C-alpha cells in the first residue's frame, strides 16, 4: 500500500514535491465517502483508496507518473541492466541554473507486511549520490542502511547487506544489489515494486500492457471476470477469445531507446450477437479487436487485467490519462470499483491523471483525494491537494476549478488574433 511519494529535480519538478495517500482529518458531505473511500491501518494512519490529479496540458501530471515509473524501473533493474560505464537515464530539471549538476531526488513510503518502509535515493546521470532505507518495526522509525556515494552505513537489522557494499557499482542501487544476493528484506521490497506497484504510462506502447491482460486470460477465474467486466460496460461484446496468430516484433523500452525482438502475437477476437429480420438472435459474429473495435474498447480490454488484479490482490495501480477515449460514466464506474468496501475489500489503490471535470464532485471524491499540478512562470511544476484550500465539503468542486479558484488551469490567449478580423 502506498503512503506517499516524493520527487525533486526531475523533469518539470524543480523543488521537492510530495504526493500523499494519507487520509486527512476531514469529512465529506456524503458520509459514505468517509467509510468507502478510506481504509484504516491503525489509530494513527488511514489511507485513501483513490486519488485524481488534475492540471492543464503540460503542467506536469504525466511527469509525476514518469517519476514513479523511473523509480520503479531503476529499483528493479539498476543492478542487472547497467554496466559500470553506463550512465543513468534520469532527467533533471533543465530550466534553472540552480539545478545544474545537482542530483534528482526520489523517495517512497509504503506498507509491506504490516511495516512502514521509507526508501529513497538521489542520482545524477552517472552515479548514485545517496540512498537510504528506514522502517518502523513497532512505533518508531529505525534506519536499516544509509549511503553517501561509496560510503555505506549498514545497521544490524539489515545484516543481509553487511558484505555486499563492495559489490555495489557507483551507478547501481545498493538495495537492488542486496536483493540479487537473496537478501530477505531487500527481495521483499523489490517484489513489492515489481508486483504491487503497477504503472500504466504513456511512455510505453499499449501492447505491453495488453500482454498483462492476455496472461491473466489464461486463468479461468480472471478470464470470466475480464469478460464480465467488458460485458457490463455495455460495449456490445458477448464473448472474447485469444488465439495465437503470427510472429511480430515486440517493442521494448530500455534506457530511453526502443528495442525490438520477435515474439508470437496473439489475435484477440470479440463476439457480438447477430440477429435475423424478426430481431431474434441467430449466432455470434466474430470480430478482430484491433481492426473492428473502437479505441475505447481496446483500451478497456488492455486495462482490464491490471485493474482486476489490483482489486483482487490489494495492489497500487497508477494510470496516466485514465479518462482518455472513455465515456465519463465508464471512468466513474471504474473509480467506484476502488471506492467500494465490497469490490475493493483488499484495499487496492487507484491513482490517475485526468482532465475529466465531471468527476470533480463531492459525491465521488473527498477533498483530500483531489490533487493539482500547476507550472509557475519559471516552468517548474507545483503539486498540491484541494484539502490545502479552505473549501467547504459541499462546495461545487467542478465549477470552482473551471473558474480558476484552485489554479491548475490553462490561461488561453485570444486565438482569434491568429486569423484576424473577417474584413481585414
Image (spheres, helix red, strand yellow):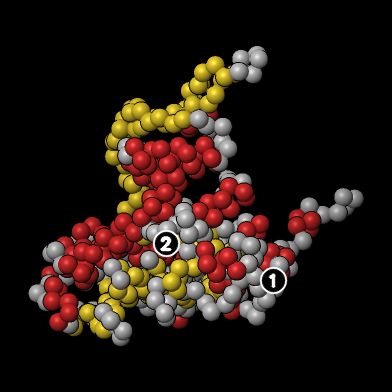
Q: Is residue 162 above or below residue 305?
A: below
- Which residue in the rendered view is the most extreme toward the top? 277
Decide if residue 410 is in sight here: no
Q: Residue at x 56, y 36 (%)?
A: 235
Residue 163 or residue 375, whichever sits in front: 163
Q: Is residue 281 above or below residue 235?
A: above
- Which residue in the rendered view is the most extreme toward the left? 163
Looking at the rendering, which quadrant does residue 59 occupy? Answer: bottom right
The label number, if any, that marks residue 394 in the structure image: 1
Residue 385 or residue 166, whichever sits in front: 385
The x, y position of residue 126, in whole percent, is 28, 69
The label number, if any, that marks residue 347 in the structure image: 2
The label number, if any, that marks residue 220 in the structure image: none
Left or right side of 135 for 292: right
Q: Is residue 205 above or below residue 175?
A: above
The x, y position of residue 46, in whole percent, is 45, 73
SS for dot 1:
loop
Looking at the rendering, which quadrant does residue 151 occupy? Answer: bottom left
Residue 97 or residue 273, whichever sits in front: 273
- Which residue in the rendered view is the most extreme toward the bottom? 140
Q: Residue at x 36, y 45 (%)?
A: 212
Q: Quadrant of the N terminus?
A: bottom left
Residue 271 or residue 418, whichever sits in front: 271
Amino acid at each position: 500500500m502506498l503512503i506517499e511519494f516524493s520527487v525533486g529535480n526531475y523533469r518539470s519538478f524543480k523543488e521537492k514535491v510530495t504526493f500523499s495517500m494519507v487520509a486527512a482529518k476531514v469529512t465529506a458531505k456524503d458520509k459514505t465517502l468517509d467509510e468507502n473511500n478510506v481504509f484504516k491501518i491503525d489509530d494513527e494512519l488511514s489511507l485513501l483508496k483513490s486519488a485524481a490529479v488534475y492540471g492543464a496540458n503540460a503542467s506536469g501530471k504525466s511527469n509525476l507518473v514518469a517519476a514513479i515509473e523511473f523509480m520503479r524501473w531503476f529499483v528493479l533493474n539498476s543492478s542487472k541492466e547497467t554496466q559500470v560505464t553506463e550512465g543513468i537515464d534520469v532527467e533533471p530539471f533543465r530550466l534553472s541554473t540552480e539545478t545544474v549538476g545537482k542530483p534528482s531526488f526520489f523517495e517512497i513510503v509504503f506498507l509491506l507486511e504490516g511495516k512502514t518502509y521509507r526508501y529513497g535515493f538521489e542520482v545524477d546521470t552517472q552515479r548514485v549520490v545517496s540512498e537510504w532505507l528506514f522502517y518502523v518495526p513497532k512505533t518508531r522509525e529505525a534506519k536499516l542502511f544509509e549511503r553517501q556515494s561509496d560510503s555505506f552505513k549498514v545497521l544490524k537489522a539489515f545484516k543481509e547487506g553487511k558484505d555486499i557494499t563492495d559489490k555495489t557499482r557507483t551507478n547501481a542501487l545498493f538495495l537492488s544489489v542486496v536483493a540479487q544476493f537473496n537478501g530477505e528484506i531487500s527481495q521483499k521490497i523489490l517484489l513489492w515494486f515489481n508486483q504491487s506497484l503497477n504503472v500504466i504510462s504513456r511512455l510505453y506502447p499499449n501492447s505491453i500492457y495488453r500482454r498483462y491482460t492476455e496472461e491473466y486470460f489464461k486463468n479461468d477465474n480472471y478470464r470470466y471476470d475480464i469478460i464480465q467486466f467488458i460485458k457490463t460496460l455495455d460495449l456490445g461484446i458477448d464473448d472474447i477469445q485469444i488465439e495465437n496468430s503470427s510472429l511480430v516484433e515486440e517493442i521494448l523500452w530500455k534506457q530511453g531507446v526502443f528495442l525490438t525482438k520477435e515474439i508470437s502475437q496473439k489475435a484477440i477476437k470479440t463476439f457480438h450477437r447477430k440477429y435475423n429480420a424478426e430481431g431474434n438472435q441467430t449466432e455470434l459474429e466474430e470480430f478482430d479487436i484491433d481492426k473492428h473495435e473502437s479505441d475505447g474498447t481496446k483500451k478497456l480490454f488492455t486495462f482490464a487485467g491490471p485493474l482486476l488484479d489490483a482489486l483482487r490482490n490489494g495492489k497500487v495501480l497508477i494510470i496516466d490519462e485514465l479518462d482518455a477515449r472513455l465515456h465519463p460514466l465508464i471512468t466513474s464506474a471504474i473509480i467506484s470499483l476502488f471506492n467500494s468496501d465490497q469490490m475493493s475489500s483488499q484495499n487496492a489503490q487507484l491513482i490517475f491523471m485526468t482532465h475529466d471535470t465531471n468527476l470533480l464532485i463531492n459525491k465521488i471524491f473527498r477533498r483530500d483525494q483531489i490533487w493539482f499540478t500547476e507550472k509557475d512562470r519559471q516552468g517548474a511544476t507545483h503539486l498540491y491537494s484541494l484539502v490545502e484550500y479552505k473549501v467547504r465539503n459541499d462546495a461545487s468542486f467542478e465549477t470552482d476549478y473551471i473558474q480558476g479558484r484552485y489554479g491548475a488551469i490553462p490561461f488561453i490567449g485570444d486565438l482569434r488574433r491568429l486569423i484576424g478580423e473577417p474584413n481585414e
